[in-house]
């Protein structure tokens, strides 16, 4: 694509090819255009798109590594990731120049006959591949039969329509972005099912040296989302060092009132670590300043470790490219 003004740079926005990914990337492209830039989408195939194996087997970063490679190679200028798919280890080659306002981070139940979670009978077949979801669903003690599930969102919800499964659990944000909230029979309360750290949020990345572009992308940043995501990811990073069991987390900016009646913002964080067989779930929460979000998340993680998270054993196989994906 060429612009009439020869000098105007066309920013290439890299994305995976799924409907979910391109829809997400398109919102970023529109945001960049609103910020006065010219931008086009570039589809990048990732290992996660080429393989139908469980994410635990193909490893952390399957959805994001190829996008990051395209960024380093100069094939794209911006990479739009689902934040929760990014490995927690910082990568100095890139900056997350914007974390746009997040979607509702909750998990969603898509069940036959309009059923909600509590109405699913013993032995109901529920599809999900995320160890985090499986562990928390088992912990409910309803006797649900948790079965593996992969593929794009359409494929997954199709298994309920076809009668193969009684229900599936997926990220509500994903359904929202592809315009399929109509199939949701219940948005699951975090008290029952804590979402993945950073679920529903995007990471808009560019090369670390691309300062001008980073500044332009920065106009898409939402400080409250950034604070929440940094806390959730701080919690995850700290837990990864000390335990291998699945992790759920949600952080929210809440209004508080000080002694003089002044209203101020605080960050409320809830987290859990769950045994994959559903035998135990450790939960804790913390409230603190929005200005030190990552450290607040790490504090909560240390509390979870002290409460016994260290001893919860994850029975899933270690991933090929390192670590258990907490998605
Ligand atoms: N694990 C894959 C993945 N990565 C991001 C989303 C959905 C969108 C989001 O959470 O931001 C999904 C699908 C899902 O978990 O159901």
Image (spheres, rainbow, N blue to C red):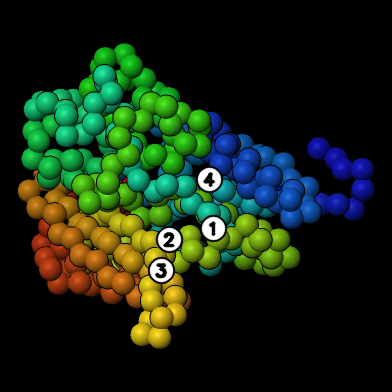
Callout in the foreground (3, 2): 3
Question: Label 4 vs label 1: CA separation?
Answer: 20 Å
Pick the front one: 252 or 247: 252
* Residue ID for mark 2: 229
Q: Residue 161: percent from the left, percent from the top?
A: 33, 16
Q: Give the x, y percent position of residue 141.
A: 8, 40
Q: Is residue 256 above or below residue 49?
A: below
- Label 1 – label 2 distance at C-alpha: 9 Å
Mark 3 or mark 4, which has the lower sequence index? 4
Which residue, given by chain and number where applicable, does mark 1 sit on? Answer: 99
Residue at image point 44% right, 41% down? 173
* Residue drawn where x is 36% and y is 85% of the image: 259
Given residues 145 and 223, the one toward you in this image is 223
Give the labeled residue for mark 4: 66
Q: What residue sits 43% from the left and 31% below the top? A: 181
Crowdedness of circle 2 by 10 Å Cα count: few (<14), some, many (20+)?
A: many
Indicate the position of residue 117 as horizontal and vertical percent values: 21, 34
Kindly identify the residue that appears in the image at 92 percent across and 48 percent down.
5
Q: Say if residue 232 shows up in the picture.
A: no
Whole-number angstrom distance, CA of label 1 to CA of label 3: 21 Å
Q: CB atoms at circles 1 and 2 under 8 Å apart?
A: yes
């Amino acid at each position: 694509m060429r612009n009439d003004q020869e000098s105007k740079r066309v920013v290439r926005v890299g994305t995976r090819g799924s409907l979910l990914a391109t829809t997400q990337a398109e919102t970023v492209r529109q945001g960049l255009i609103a910020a006065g830039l010219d931008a086009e989408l570039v589809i990048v195939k990732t290992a996660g798109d080429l393989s139908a194996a469980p994410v635990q087997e193909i490893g952390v970063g399957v959805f994001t590594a190829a996008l990051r490679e395209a960024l380093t190679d100069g094939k794209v200028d911006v990479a739009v990731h689902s934040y929760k798919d990014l490995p927690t280890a910082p990568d100095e080659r890139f900056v997350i120049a914007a974390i746009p306002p997040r979607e509702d981070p909750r998990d969603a139940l898509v069940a036959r006959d309009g059923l909600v979670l509590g109405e699913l009978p013993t032995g109901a077949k529920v599809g999900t591949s995320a160890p985090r979801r499986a562990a928390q669903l088992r912990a409910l003690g309803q006797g649900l039969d948790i079965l593996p599930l992969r593929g794009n969102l359409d494929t997954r919800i199709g298994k309920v329509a076809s009668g193969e499964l009684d229900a599936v659990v997926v990220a509500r944000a994903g359904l929202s972005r592809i315009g399929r909230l109509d199939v949701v029979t219940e948005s699951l309360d975090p008290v029952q099912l804590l979402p993945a750290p950073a679920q529903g949020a995007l990471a808009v990345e560019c090369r670390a040296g691309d300062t001008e572009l980073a500044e332009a992308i920065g106009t898409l940043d939402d400080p409250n989302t950034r604070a929440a995501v940094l806390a959730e990811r701080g919690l995850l990073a700290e837990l990864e060092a000390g335990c291998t069991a699945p992790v759920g987390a949600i952080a929210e900016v809440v209004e508080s009132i000080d002694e003089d009646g002044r209203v101020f913002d605080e960050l409320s964080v809830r987290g859990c670590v769950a045994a994959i067989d559903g035998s135990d779930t450790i939960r804790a929460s913390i409230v603190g300043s929005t200005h030190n979000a990552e450290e607040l998340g790490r504090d909560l993680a240390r509390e979870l470790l002290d409460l016994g998270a260290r001893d919860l054993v994850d029975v899933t196989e270690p991933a090929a490219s390192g670590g258990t994906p907490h998605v």
